[in-house]
Image: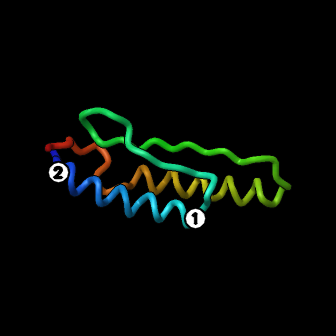
Amino acid sequence: MRTVKYSELSRAMHDFTKQIDTLDECIEVGLVSGEKVQISISASCPEANPERVAEFAKHLSEVAVAAKNFKYAGCTIVR
């Protein structure tokens, strides 16, 4: 079983969130509360032209892959 200290996870999430913020301001990531590390993704694309929606969809897909590959995904959190 893989584990991660909460302090280490917190630092990694801070860096991950900053990375996502630079990609697209309409996409947010966070931790799902629980014993194991899970990333939640929320997104809101206001009315936009087709090009912006296509860009948003691309960014959302990239965020989904990054969240799936987050180095602590699935780890048990220890205090």
Residue type, label 1: Leu
Could you tell me which quadrant the N terminus lies in?
A: top left
Q: Residue at x 29, y 32 (%)?
A: 34
x 61%, y 45%: residue:
43
Total labels drawn? 2
The image quadrant that residue 16 belongs to is: bottom left
Helix, strand or loop for disc 2: strand
Q: Which residue is mark 1?
A: 23
The answer to whether residue 36 is left or right of residue 66 is left
Determine whether, in the image, residue 68 is placed left or right of residue 73: right
**Label 1: few (<14), some or many (≥20) within 10 Å?**
some
Relative image position of residue 59 (x, y in whole percent): 62, 58
In this picture, is 31 found above or below 11? above
**As rendered, which of 61 and 32 lies closer to the eye?**
32
Considering the numbered disc 1 on the image, is that residue within a helix, a strand or a loop?
Answer: helix
In the picture provided, is 32 more to the left or to the right than 64? Answer: left
Q: Residues within 10 Å of mark 2 (few under 14, many from 20)?
A: few
